[in-house]
Amino acid sequence: MKGSGSIDIAVKGLKDLKKQLDKMDAQSQTVIKRTVSDFKSRAPAWVSAAVVSRYGINKTEISNSKKKTKKIVSIKATGTTVDNAALVYQGRPLTPTHFKMRPTTRPKSTKDENGKTIRRARPYTVTAEVLKGQREALGPKVFLGSTRKGKEIPFQRVGKERKPIEAVKRLAVPQMIEYEQVTQKIREDIDKNLGERFRGHLKRELSKK
């Protein structure tokens, strides 16, 4: 006589083990989420530190660029997991004013009360420190002039005549980031710092009962 049936199987402690595994999965997701959050909030500062280790730009020029009316660079960390995390950056070419330029204003002639020149402005050479610790002259045709907003920046004559002239530009921050030594330092810093953050989050989660 044919028939059918079933037997309920109950393994002692299986439910508790299942709960522990579920908890571990939740903990791992928390660790990853917090690590990625750290990457997004801290990576721009790590990038800035790597850039200023090579170039003569001030760190606040990069890290505080969000507060500026005209940003010189935008650095963002993206991704939802450690595997797809990435750095996205963009920026415009910078004038030497961002690289410790000297002088910052052009020397002026001294005039008497009638407006007559009694001492001509002294000759000057515009220099900048694009590479950290390496000050360079920008060239004999470079001079300081005022923009429409009244800021003094370096210009250079394009030909032999007084005009046309164009603003002198140097590197953009993305070019600095992509320099081999800077890129390598960024990767090393992220690996070191993010690894420490990951291990810290993991230790805290595993210590919870």
Image: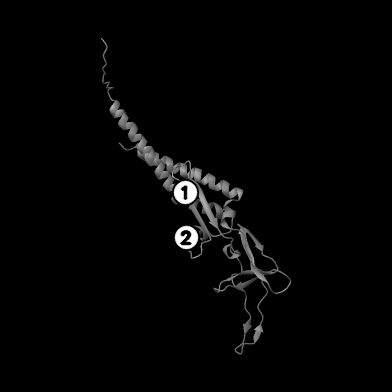
Direction top: furthest residue: 1
In this picture, residue 156 sits left or right of residue 51: right
User: Which quarter shows the C terminus?
Assistant: top left
Residue 145 location, quadrant: bottom right
Above or below residue 33? Residue 153 is: below
SS type, badge 1: strand
Residue 117 at x, y percent in the picture: 65, 85
Residue 123 at x, y percent in the picture: 68, 74
Residue type at mark 2 is: Lys
SS type, badge 2: helix
Viewer-nearest residue: 36 or 143: 36
Q: Residues within 10 Å of mark 1 (few under 14, many from 20)?
A: some
Which residue is depicted at the point 37% across and 41% down?
30
Residue type at mark 1 is: Thr
Q: For mark 2, what is the residue?
A: 66
Residue 152 at x, y percent in the picture: 58, 71
In this picture, residue 37 sits left or right of residue 129: left
Which residue is depicted at the point 28% across and 29% down?
16
Residue 103 at x, y percent in the picture: 61, 69
User: Which quarter shows the N terminus?
Assistant: top left
Viewer-nearest residue: 155 or 128: 155
Q: For mark 1, what is the residue?
A: 78
From where the camera sits, is residue 200 visible?
no
Which residue is depicted at the point 40% across and 45% down?
34
Q: Residues within 10 Å of mark 2 (few under 14, many from 20)?
A: some
Name the N-terminal-most of marks 2 and 1.
2
Above or below residue 169? Residue 123 is: below
Mark number, residue 184: none
Total number of numbered discs in the rendering:
2
Which residue is depicted at the point 54% across and 56% down?
90
Could you tell me how far apart the alpha carbons at marks 2 and 1 are, in whole angstroms?
17 Å
